[in-house]
Amino acid sequence: MQLDLLVEKFQKKDATAFETLYGMYAENICGVINTIVKNEGRSQEICQDVFVKIWNNASSYNSAKGRFFTWILNIARNAAIDEIRSRSYKNEKKNLSADYFVSVLESKEDDSTTTTDTKGLKKLVQSLKKKCVQIIELLYFRGYTQKEAAEELAIPIGTVKTRNRSCISKLRENMEVE
Amino acid sequence: MNVQEYIASGILELYVAGVLTEKENLEIDAYAKEYPEIKAEIINIENAILELTRRSNTVNPYSFDTLKTKLGNLESDTKVIPMKKGSDWTPYLGWAASILLAIGLFWVYNQNENLKSDIEIVEQQNQALEQQIADSDASLEKTQDLLNTLRDKNISVISLGGQEVSPTSYAKAYWNRQEEKVFIDAQGLPEPPDGFVYQVWSLKLSPLTPTSMGLLEDFATDDNKVFALNNPNDSEAFGITLEPAGGSESPTLEQLYTLGVVSAS
């Protein structure tokens, strides 16, 4: 089914459409949340809360203001940041731990019983430079603005856009190679 | 505008990341609708991010059923509407109930009144029946008395046969000589015409001497047609004549209805 149509049905409180969308995005959203929260149990809870929230606020989504996934992504990132703040992390998001979404690869390298390239992540990111991993982490997983990312990475603001573009392009190349 | 340059600027990647201003978002949405290449590029970028986020995920989402339960059985609107309807008429339910209760109470009150008047009627009927029973008892007592009187061993029974004026008439005289009383059973006499009355005579036969014993007053209204008269005479026969109201000094023999002779004993 067309995404637009699916989203439209979802906004009319069609439970079946919601289930389809949940199947499409739940893993992604849970993953993004865990990148920030770093607690799988809590991330599961928050992830569910996010989908509860989007169901209850379905009518507030406006396709003219962004992609549906992006809308959920923003809600998820905010929920995750709220979580770590409520855990009395006094830190601003700039001071969050420097772990990257790829840390899952490193953490599982010691574990001989599981393959390190679970879900093909390694294939996807192995050729990415560290600066690509960093910028993707900041922009997609943490919701940094261009300005915030520029400050975090100590690069000119104009560079954020172009560097990110080339990093995503590399990612897409890796996908096509598969 | 140069679509390729726009794409190459990297703004679409930021659009998917959701880090642009609302104004920029609206602008890109407009371009995406105008230029299919831009739309396609956005979708490709999104797919790359979806792939990346999916593969880097280590958290198992809860099942959709769990989510559903948390949402309290989210069904589509069809389930919500009836509930709204339900809440719409709920306030009226109270009114409807109280009206029904009022009607019910009125009905019960009415039933009660009806039953009360029914009871009254039955009580009246009961009284009437009791009266009837009392009357019957009294009547029975009288009859019993009469029967006992007639059965008295001192009673002589004299049959009075019909005479020329009325051959089918008959009567009986029950004479208690000791008590000097005669009971005349006039059942076999016709009802006297208006202005006339039966008169009973005690007769001596030789010579023929009639003595009036009295009148059978109120003949028509007397139920058992048994009349008690005094008879101190030493009668040899009894006769009954029809006389003008008030009776006569001597019998009108032409109007002699019945006559009977006392048998010698």
Image (cartoon, coloured by chain):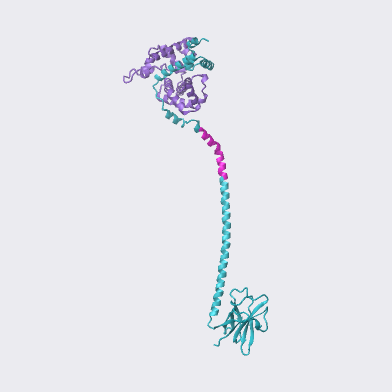
Chain colours: A purple, B cyan
**Residue B156: percent from left, percent from top:** 55, 83
Residue B68: quarter of image: top left
Give the residue displayed 57% in from the left and 70% down from the top. Answer: B135
Residue B255: quarter of image: bottom right
**Residue A66: percent from left, percent from top:** 50, 19
Q: Foreground: A24 or B97?
A: A24
Residue B131: quarter of image: bottom right
Q: Main secondary structure of the magenta part?
A: helix
Q: Foreground: B34 or B264?
A: B264
Give the residue displayed 65% in from the left and 82% down from the top. Answer: B254
**Residue A128: percent from left, percent from top:** 40, 12
**Can residue A103 be seen in this snapshot?**
yes
How many marks are shown on the rendered structure?
Answer: 0
**Residue A168: percent from left, percent from top:** 43, 13
Q: Does B199 sit left or right of B32 as displayed?
A: right
Q: Looking at the image, is B199 positioned above or below residue A7?
A: below
The residue stretch that appears in magenta:
B80-99
Give the residue displayed 55% in from the left and 68% down from the top. Answer: B133
- B88 part of magenta stretch: yes
